[in-house]
Image (cartoon, helix red, strand yellow):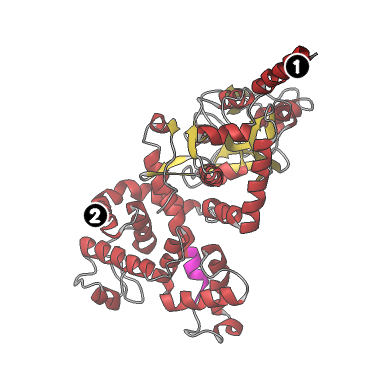
Amino acid sequence: MKFISLLLASLSLLIACGEAQPHLEEIRERGELRVLSRYGPTSYYVKGDSLAGFEYELAQRFAEHLNVRLKIIVPDNLGDMLTMIEQGKADIAAAGLTITPARQELIRFGPVYQEVTQQLVYRKGTKKPKNLTALADGQLEVVANSSHVEELVSQQQEIPELDWTENDELDSSGLLELVELQMIDYTIADSNEIAANQALFPELRVAFNVSEPQPLAWAMPRADDGTLYNEVAAFYEQIEESGFLDRLIEKYYGHIRRFDYVDTRAVHRRTLTHLPKYQALFEQAAAEYDFDWRLLAATSYQESHWNPNAVSSTGVKGLMMLTQATAKQMKIKDRKDPAQSIHAGAKYLAYLRDNLPERIIEPDRTWIALAAYNVGMGHVEDARVLTERNGKSPDLWPDIKEHLPLLSKKKWYEKTRYGYARGGEPVRYVENIRRYYDILLHSQQNNNSESDIRTNEQAPPAAL
């Protein structure tokens, strides 16, 4: 009997040793969170010397939450990504994946963090289709294995003549570019991707919605024992309560809701005709005052459209449109001299940024400084006071930009130190600069090889 008891105990020990290690414990033990993503403006991209992207920053935050390093892996295509996460070859797929019934049979989704709508895209100057039945004479191409394919298959039941091509080499951004270049007639993309790419491909237009709003979420292997899923759910609850998720959405999408076709076309044109003359000067000033040179260039474009002889009705002049008082404060003599103007403008913007309270972090710090460059620090401080009085944060640009327009209303400016201001102007000013900055950023990145970032270890958080 004693022998049998010992045998049973040994067998129990062997079974216990053979049990799978909890997924979350495995991640912490290896010290690495393996995340699948894709290269593009809504997910993951190189920004200067660091990495950025909505999905990247979310994943980075979660890795910090787990106290492990982040490893981003970019599969060759969406089909490979879905297969890899299904087979448990990564912990999470963070790539703006739509939750669909077909996918839910194969992978497990975390909490919903955003909703998007599938939209049909065509090129300006061509006939706008009214519905899917009107696509018979054109070429519709969509990303293989995407939710767009699932939607088309569903629609084909009612529209048997509906036809399309599936591309397993390009992502949505690549297909949007093909429409821009008139290499295909139509594609379907998610509304957030269209918004993010609109400034890069200004000829694109949305014809109609293909689907109802659909949820986006991270994907995990169905074999997950629940430990990772539960931690992801707790993490999302935390970032929603703290406001981090809302701030991240504003950071990547808050400035791209408004689209100006004529202005965007002009930026692309002047990037080729005007910017090369001054790029080295922007780079020098940026290095000296710790800015991304493209941010300075974007600010200059907003101010003067890169015209060194620009003069406003109020007497501000040059590439950075400096007042006489600012030129004197920054110790330059000729506001129309490109080198002096760019150097002084960068120095003044750095002065405004560096004199904000230390608790204000990037990118809010830069957006607030830019608003002050436009309307003056006094009025920005008034807006920050109003923001705090109304129960919002005076250190967050999304909250401040809600209150700046109040400075033009007597009910509000009478309560401030510096009085009336056209407070809507600095809001538009900052949002324009952010759009121009995105155009400069992504137009350069499109010339870089994506293979340089196929797999990246943990990198510093994105900063301007």
Left or right, 350 with respect to 16, comes to left
- Image quarter for residue 284? bottom left
Mark 2 crowdedness (10 Å alpha carbons): few <14, some 14-19, many ≥20: some
Q: Position of residue 310 (x, y in %)?
A: 30, 66
Q: Position of residue 125 (x, y in %)?
A: 53, 41
What is the spatial separation of the Cα atoms under label 2 and label 1, in whole angstroms?
75 Å
Label disc, if present, on residue 461 of the rendered structure: none
Left or right, 290 with respect to 262, comes to left
Residue 380 shows in this picture: yes
Residue extent of the magenta highlight: 422-428
Q: Position of residue 213 (x, y in %)?
A: 71, 43
Label disc, if present, on residue 8 of the rendered structure: 1
Q: Amino acid at mark 2?
A: Gln
Q: Amino acid at mark 1?
A: Leu
**Above or below, 454 relative to 288:** above
Residue that protrudes farthest toward the left in the picture? 333
> Counting residues from the N terminus, which is met first, the one under dot 2 or under dot 1?
1
Q: Nearer the viewer, mark 2 or mark 1?
A: 1
Q: Nearer the viewer, residue 439 or 44?
A: 44
The residue under the point 58% across, 82% down is 412
Pointer 2: what residue?
A: 284
Q: Nearer the viewer, residue 267 or 290?
A: 290
